[in-house]
Amino acid sequence: MFNGRGLVLPLVLTGCLFAARNYAREIPGDPDGGSSAAQAPSGPTPSAAAKSTHYIASGLRAGAIKTSNGWNLKDFAASIMNPNSVEITVTWKLISDDSKFAFRDGSLGTWTQTFKIPPMSSGTFNVYCPQVAEVHIPTVTVCAVPALTNFKGSTEFSSSLPFYAYSGHEFETGEATNADPDRAWYDAWDAWQDAVPVIWDPDLQQFVVPYTNFWHNVKDYPVGWHSTLSIKNNSGQRVSYLIQHKPIWGAFKDPTSGCREEDMSDQTFPLVLDKGQELNTSLEGLFGWPSNETSAMEGIILIRPTPITAAAQTSISSWVGPNSFGTSGCVDSPLISVMITSPVAKVEGTVNVAASAVGTTGIPIDKVEFYVDGKLSSTGTSSPYEFKWDTTAVSNGHHALTAVAYAHEAGTDSHTVNVTVSNPSPR
């Protein structure tokens, strides 16, 4: 069935029934009947329930807040899909609840950006990016919210032709807190999981499914995410499904070839389901993506049933969640690194806490912050990076010491050690 990364034979399920997902979504109505779903709604659409020329979502947060326990971070992203046969121009707005909030490009209160999406293509954009990413941002169409600031408000998308927007609460993380704000951002996204909107497009005569698939990814995402797809034929006849994979971007890294990148390309997969049959699979399993390689990709899946009338009797669902399978084959080295070199595991009185911090290829270290149990205790701007810690100010027992190194050209790195404070009892 598989030929490398290509697929040459249809998968036919006739004698077995794959386990059903309890989040399968029925597609109501007759897609050939010219229902109102084929028309772009006249007002703003609050979610990706249908194609529209205007989307809006409110009550959103993207950014970092300094707390006594570290940096509390939450984020959301936006993905735009153009289902038209011509290029479209999309206007994206972020409207802050605070009219004086300063966006990355200097605008206050409202951030506006226009960008072009080619036909049958899509784009994904981050709202907030950590310090480690800001130095690599190519344009202002991403990371509108500056590092170490916090946006609260709404987002809007508009265009003259209908399109799909997946944003706000559909691609929103939970909260994460860490002494290192960059690590808090990664922690928030690492735990992200959600049901993915699956939409029947009556003009395309296909189901549209966005996806995210980071499989055995690089250092910053040691777990990453992967997407699953469930298709069930509820009709009384055999149905063929042509599944098309159209990546926005993505690449594989093969450890046996020195982790050289190989770009993703369009793929198709022919599937045949007998009546009542169901396919439940991961995308890497469906398309034959190698499980021994590091990969990162985002895009859309298009699914066309034959006969078309079977769409109304087809249940399709998709889910994206953390990928806990296997270990990464290709790991990126950090541009900077920090390590606490003292004290030892058991301490008392006043001790010297020291850390070494280095940057590759001569990258200078801007500062090193020291935290005790998540609370900032000292900051060093030049080597040696160290401070005197009075352990009598804390209780006896286990405590966490964290050093966070900052470099404007390379972001941050952190290191935590656990020590036991054992001061003698006062007489």
Image (cartoon, rainbow, N blue to C red):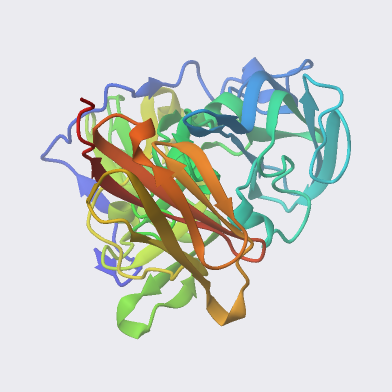
Residue 143 makes an appearance in the image: yes
Above/below status of 328 relative to 262: above
Q: Nearer the viewer, residue 127 or 411?
A: 411
Above/below status of 273 relative to 337: above
Q: Position of residue 69 (x, y in %)?
A: 47, 30
Task: Please state, as top left, top right, bottom left or bottom right, where the C terminus lies in the image.
Answer: top left
Quarter of the image where one finds residue 80: top right
Left or right of 232 on screen, residue 110: right
Query: What residue lies at 36% left-to-right and 26% top-to-bottom?
Result: 315
Q: Nearer the viewer, residue 376 or 223?
A: 376
Above/below status of 244 relative to 83: below
Above/below status of 163 relative to 387: above
Left or right of 83 on screen, residue 212: left
Residue 243 makes an appearance in the image: no
Q: Position of residue 210 (x, y in %)?
A: 51, 41
Q: Residue most toward the front?
A: 427
Query: What residue lies at 24% left-to-right and 63% top-to-bottom?
Result: 1
Quarter of the image where one finds residue 55: top right
Task: Report the number of discs.
Answer: 0
Q: Nearer the viewer, residue 59 or 86?
A: 59
Q: Position of residue 422 (x, y in %)?
A: 21, 39
Quarter of the image where one finds residue 408: bottom right
Q: Residue most toward the bottom?
A: 257
Q: Position of residue 212 (x, y in %)?
A: 46, 46
